[in-house]
Image (cartoon, rainbow, N blue to C red):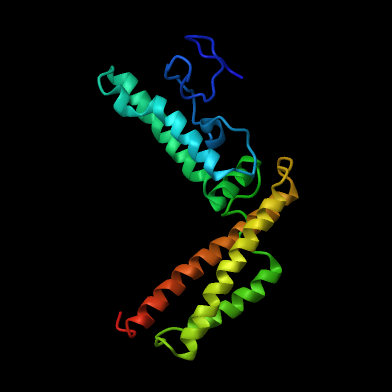
Amino acid sequence: MPSCPSCQAPLATPLVCTNCNALQDCEGELGPYEAMGLEPDWVVEPKQLKRTLLQLSRFVHPDYFATAEEETLARAERASAALNSAYEILDDDLARADYLVNRLGGPKENEERQMPQPFLIQVMEWNEILEDAQGAQEGSDEWNAMKELGTSLTSERAERIQMIGDLLTPLPDRESEVLTNARREINAIRYIDRAQRELKNLQLNAALGGSH
């Protein structure tokens, strides 16, 4: 564990010393785990992650450096932004999975566009429901089909997140084939997210009588 150049205390994060409050001069861009002082792992406890964010933010918030030199204030602003960005990634299952797959040398989104083969059959069925629901009226058969689809998508998303967790626990070796499978699951979730957004718009239009 690196030490603070000012007081030699161990650094909880490369961004700031929580012992003497000295902002650190970080070289290069920190990953979210490094910024939060955590070891890379799929499992993240949301409440503990939030506590860590709040604890570290106390030491780097720009308001505390409002009267400091311009360089120090800029460093605080960068540190605060890095913590907030790290939290957003680690607190989001999909963003965290995407980061880990990339970090471990797995295929990027533009390199592996496939989804799991069995999932594609469901995609075809769901696309038909979404197509039939165009211009649907509230209370119609298409409306009821949309409601059922919404439940299915929510359930399927949770299952796919669990599958990713199983693939990334423990973290696989760099460039492992497991990372390709994880990327395909991420692609499936992104399809589900798009379908949920489209479904929400269709339901809103149906509730408004198809006037929008």
State the residue lying farthest toward the bottom.
Answer: 140
Image quarter in which the C terminus is found: bottom left
Question: In terms of depth relative to the viewer, which is nearer, 24 or 101?
Answer: 24
- Identify the image quadrant of residue 54: top left
Would you place residue 124 above or below residue 187 in this image?
below
| Residue 132, visible in the rendered structure | no
Question: In terms of depth relative to the viewer, which is nearer, 113 or 14?
Answer: 14
State the residue lying farthest toward the left.
Answer: 67
- Identify the image quadrant of residue 79: top left
Residue pictured at 54% horizontal, 24% vertical: 12
Residue 91 percent coordinates (x, y):
52, 46
Residue pictured at 71% horizontal, 46% vertical: 169
Residue 25 percent coordinates (x, y):
45, 19
Would you place residue 1 above or below residue 168 in this image?
above
Residue 95 percent coordinates (x, y):
53, 49
Would you place residue 74 above or below residue 187 in this image?
above
| Residue 118, visible in the rendered structure | yes
Residue 31 percent coordinates (x, y):
53, 35
Residue pictured at 58% horizontal, 17% vertical: 2
- Counting labels gives 0
Give the side of residue 75 with respect to residue 53, left or right. left
Image quarter in which the N terminus is found: top right
